[in-house]
Structure formats: structure tokens, C-alpha cells
Amino acid sequence: MRLTIKYFGMLAETTSVSEEQLEIESSSVAKLIVKLKDKYPELNNLDFKIAVDQRLVSNEDHIHAEAEVALLPPFAGG
Amino acid sequence: MEKKKPKNVFREGAISSEFIGTSIAKHQTKTSIGAHNIFLGQVRADSIDDKTITAIEYTAYEDMANQKFHEIRETTFEKFDLTCMHIYHSLGKVNAGEICLFVFVSSPRRKVVFEALEYVVEAIKADVPVFGKEIFEDQTHQWKQNT
């Protein structure tokens, strides 16, 4: 299934990508993270959270087709 | 559950003292209010390894951030007896000494606004996907992280 992946802050800087489409076969957050770390090994050293359709999710959660996935580095508002 | 579309909290660049002054003045017609409380976040010129921060460049996952601001707003109104609340956060470059966050809460009574303001500011720091690139005088940078 096809997902839109967005990268923010230092993650966009490190991967040199702010948004891309990815085709994945599985629908769990954990498997997506493995795939992303495989594509961008730098992510192994960085702290980030995942949001699916603008909600933070945990590794056990599932991702539906056409979801908007965001990789969020530590927050720094204020 | 049907929800209102979240307001846009973000403003491009620093939040000016004129803007803050005008916001206060606009409340003079709301005469049930007896107490305002205001938080202003200011960019600090921290020194790290002999280099000084001259500005922070803010970015955000804007749709999610505005949704989070909206949720914080709703929860705060549920918890505290407030007459009104306003939140503005900068995007883009804000120089050291300039204001990047303006939170304004109002209530008939003072005790409520002290508690409510702290609640709102801490929730913003913890829950809203805003990112800050701290720029040093030599144009190198590091990424800010709330503690």
C-alpha cells in the first residue's frame, strides 16, 4: 500500500527529504520503522516519534492505506 | 463527534509588542474579566562552546500542531473557569530577545489565571509538534529540544 511520509526538523535535514511516497507491504508501525531505518540508517541515532494522520502512535499500531505518516523529532515549541 | 476547525495559531516571524498591546486593549470591552495573565516566550542568546545563539528558526507540522493547540484549548476551558484564551506561536526566524510565544488567559478571578496559564504553557511545550533550529553567529546551527 502507498503511504505519504513527512519528515520534520532535524529528520528532514538528515534524510534530505521533507516528504515522499512509500510503497509498503505491511501495515504495522514497527515494520514501517524498520523499513525507514533501512532506507535512512542515520535514523538509528536519532530520537523521533511517529504520527499517523496527525495522531501519535505506538509501535503496535496499524497503518491504513493512504495514511499520512509523519516522523517528528523532539518538540521545541515556545 | 463534530468539531470546530482549529484556528491557526502561527504567525510569521516574531510577535511584536504592538500586537500584544493591541490584544490587551481588545479586552477592555469584556468587563466580566477581572484578571488577565500573560506568558511571553523570548528567544534566549544561550552560549554553547563559546558560540552564541542569535536566532531560532521555527518550523512545525502545522496541521497537527493547530489540532493540538485546539485540544489544549478545549481541555483548558474544561479544567478552568476562563472567559477567554489566546495563543500565538511564531514560525520562521525569531531573533534573540524577540517574542516567539504569546499566551493570554482571562477570567473573572485571579487565582484561576495563574494555574491555567502554567497548564497551557507546559502543555504547549510537551505536546505540540514545533521544531526549532538554533542558529549561531557563525551561521552553524543545532536543534532545540524542550526539557
Image: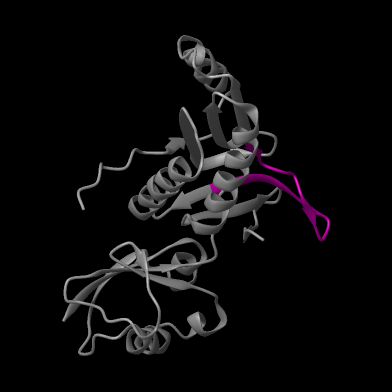
Q: Relative to the observer, which residue lies in front, B37 or B133?
A: B37
Q: Find residue B111 and report its horizontal and vertical position in percent.
A: 65, 33
Residue B64 drawn above or below residue B95: below
Magenta stretch contains residue B60: no
Residue that appears at 35% across and 50% down: B67
Q: Is residue A52 left or right of residue B116?
A: left
Q: Is residue B147 above or below residue B18?
A: below
Indicate whether B71 appears above or below B25.
Answer: below
What residue lies at 55% left-to-right and 35% top-to-bottom?
B103
Residue B86 shown left or right of residue B49 in the figure: left
Residue A63 appears left or right of B129: left
Q: Quadrant of residue A30?
A: bottom left
Between residue B129 and residue B133, name the one nearer to us: B129
User: Left or right: where does residue B64 sit relative to residue B42?
Assistant: left
How was the colour assigned to the protein in this rendering? one colour
What span is colored magenta in the figure? B40-57
Q: Position of residue B6 (x, y in %)?
A: 31, 42
- Locate the C terminus of chain B by quadrant: bottom right
Image location (x, y in percent) of residue A18: 37, 63
Q: State whether residue B101 appears in this view.
A: yes
- Rendered location of residue B142, percent (x, y): 64, 60
**Residue found at the far right of this picture:** B50
Per the image, is B50 magenta?
A: yes
**Residue in the foreground of this view, choosing between B114 and A52:** B114
Q: Residue at x 49, y 73 (%)?
A: A48
Q: Is residue B15 visible?
A: no
Considering the whole magenta stretch, tell me its main secondary structure: strand
Nearer to me, B113 or B126 = B113
